[in-house]
Amino acid sequence: MATEIRVPTLGESVSEATVGTWFKKVGDAIKADEPLCELETDKVTIEVPAPASGVLSEITANAGDTVEPGGLLGQIAEGAAAAAAPAAAEKGEKAAAAAPAAEAKPAAGASSMPPAPAAAKLLAESNIAADQVDGSGKRGQVLKGDVIAAVAKGITAPAASAEPAKVAARPASSAADAPREERVKMTRLRQTIAKRLKDAQNTAAMLTTYNEVDMKAVMDLRSRYKDIFEKKHGVKLGFMGFFTKAVTHALKELPAVNAEIDGTDIIYKNYCHVGVAVGTDKGLVVPVVRDADQMSIAEIEKEIGRLGKLARDGALSMADMQGGTFTISNGGVYGSLMSSPILNAPQSGILGMHKIQERPVVVGGQIVIRPMMYLALSYDHRMVDGKEAVTFLVRVKESLEDPERLVLDL
């Protein structure tokens, strides 16, 4: 009896996913709950566990295929059927190998394989369709040498039809450069990031205001108490706890920065769910610290640590990434001195933190060296006026330069 491997529920508002890497191949023995493959949604990457023990007898959705919740990914065989699966696959392979070469060779244009990247470029440059060339590669794939041979034979493009030709996504590379390029399909997460960022630019009246903050008070406080803090709370005292707390104080005073536009309505959020942008090897994700305004700095640091680990492990759930009302992006960890962050729509504000750098500043009429950081607030000018944006950034600056205000809720 075979057990079906189905696409699990992907979360609210997620209707499809792309099959990523299969960790097993047909004929492999598997155990219940063992990861079988990855599914990439527009927000997270999830692993699909084996619903039962046995042998992977069939894969119906290959890497790169788009699937929906409940869709069939493959089947697991058990007992005699499990033992027969690898043998049947081996028998099929031997039969295919014994077939006559002439029978195995596909006719021109009959290949199920797309042309090799270098061949595709040369086809475009020569204005020749792939189905006009006999492929010599695996499963009839058209290779660069096949295109060169076709051009030498004088094969030309067919007469133009009434159907309009497809427009190339980009100019073709030269024949010399094409072999040195690599074309890789964008992951669903990267496609979504690109779309959301562009939509934010096209929709919002985005503007950025800047300020700088003297980090000496926070750094002194952190240096004084970091060992005691870590010993008591089991987490390191970083800068994000201070910044998140400073942001929630400012959001309470300036609720427009914590609101969003919905059609002709404004939705004011009487809570602060702060998104923290985290860079991973698969792209930027923004897990959310919920009700950050009701947390202590220690609680915020613990939650950020938990979410950051999940993000790096690719284990964030949909719930971890939904419902944010404001975002903080820390480009300083990568060495950024100044940048203009892009809004995380439909939010009306995002705060960019940057590298702390010692600079000469004037304090009390004297030039002194202080650890300074540039702050950047990008905001939706449809929702937030310039005065509100500047005031918000000044409040964040005041809280960080006098961190006792955070403790006293001033």
Image: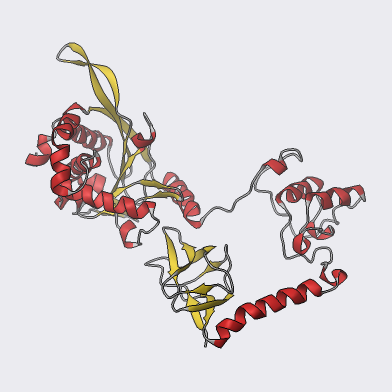
Q: Quadrant of residue 405?
A: top left
Judge from the rendering whether residue 337 lies leftward or rightward of residue 101; answer left or right: left
Asked if one can make out residue 274 in the rendered structure from this viewpoint, the answer is no
Which residue is situated farthest in the top direction here? Answer: 366
Please give the name of the residue rendered at 84% of the width and 59% of the height, measured from the top-left corner: 134
Q: Quadrant of the C terminus?
A: top left
In the depicted view, which residue is nearer to us: 357 or 321? 357
Judge from the rendering whether residue 130 lies leftward or rightward of residue 310; answer left or right: right
In the depicted view, which residue is nearer to us: 221 or 151? 221
Please give the name of the residue rendered at 52% of the width and 88% of the height, measured from the top-left corner: 1
Count of numbered circles on the image: 0
Judge from the rendering whether residue 252 lies leftward or rightward of residue 72; answer left or right: left
- How far from the left and from the top, in percent, is residue 319? 31, 62
Say if 267 sits above or below 47 in the image: above
Which residue is situated farthest in the left direction here? Answer: 408
- How far from the left and from the top, in percent, is residue 17? 49, 65
Judge from the rendering whether residue 160 lies leftward or rightward of residue 272; answer left or right: right
Please give the name of the residue rendered at 46% of the width and 61% of the height, measured from the top-left corner: 41
Say if 106 sits above or below 173 in the image: below
Q: Quadrant of residue 329?
A: top left
Which residue is situated farthest in the right direction here? Answer: 153
Please give the name of the residue rendered at 17% of the width and 50% of the height, measured from the top-left corner: 299
In the depicted view, which residue is nearer to us: 282 or 191? 282
- How far from the left and from the top, in percent, is residue 7? 47, 72
Asked if one can make out residue 373 in the rendered structure from this viewpoint, the answer is yes
- How far from the left and from the top, in percent, is residue 223? 17, 32
In the depicted view, which residue is nearer to us: 383 or 80? 80
